[in-house]
Amino acid sequence: MEWIIKDLSDIERVAEEFLAYTEGKTLFALYGPMGVGKTTFVKAVAACLGVEDDVSSPTFAIVNEYLTKKGESVYHFDFYRVNDVSEALDFGYEEYFYGGGRCFVEWPEKIEELLPEHIVNCYFSEHPSGSRILRVEM
C-alpha cells in the first residue's frame, strides 16, 4: 500500500487510513532519511489513537512511552544513536516488541537482526514536489 502525504494538513488523513490498513498490527519499522517526516507521522498516528501528550523524538532516551485515552501503550523508538546491537539488548527490547503495545521504530536498520518477522515495514521518501511518500509492506 502507498500513500502520498501532500503537506502537514494531509497527514492526519493518512494516519487514519494507515491505522485502518494495519489494524491488528503492533510493530512498525520506519525507514527513511533524516528529515523525511517519520517522527511527524508518529505524532499524527499517536493523535489518532488518542494520545494527548506531546510526542517527540526519543533520540537520546531511545524510547518514549505514551498512553492513549483507553490506557493502551504506544512506544516510539529512535535507534539513530545506537552504534551496536548490544545497546538495544541492554534495555530489554523484547518486553516492548512482544508486549502487545504499538511500537514505532525509527532507524530500524541499526537493529535489524533483533526485529521480529511480523514487523510492518514502512518506507518514507520525499517526492521532488516536496510531498512525502509512505509505502507499507506487511
Image: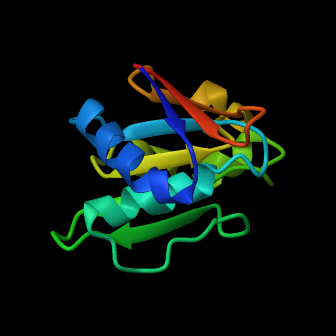
Residue at the far bottom in the pictured view: 53
Q: Position of residue 12 (x, y in %)?
A: 39, 55
**In the rendered image, is residue 108 in sight?**
yes
Q: Choose between 109 and 97: the one closer to the eye.
A: 109
Quadrant (top left, top right, bottom left, bottom right) of the C terminus: top left
Q: Residue furthest right?
A: 83
Seen in the picture, residue 12 relative to 129 is either above or below; the reply is below
**What residue do we see at 30% from left, 60% from top?**
48
Which quadrant of the structure image shows residue 24? top left
Q: Is residue 95 above or below residue 75?
A: above
Residue 128 percent coordinates (x, y) = 78, 32
Residue 33 percent coordinates (x, y): 78, 40
- In the image, taking residue 59 as reference, residue 25 lies left or right, namely left
Left of 103 or right of it: where is 5?
A: right
Residue at point 30% right, 33% down?
Answer: 22
> What residue do we see at 23% from left, 63% from top?
72
- Of 35 and 12, the residue lying toward us: 12
Q: For this view, does 101 lie left or right of residue 45?
A: left
In the drawing, does residue 118 fall left or right of residue 3?
left
Position of the N terminus, as image quadrant, is top left
- The answer to which of 50 and 15 lies nearer the viewer is 15
- Can you tell which quarter of the image residue 74 is in? bottom left
Does residue 94 sit above or below 47 in this rendering? above
Residue 84 percent coordinates (x, y): 80, 42
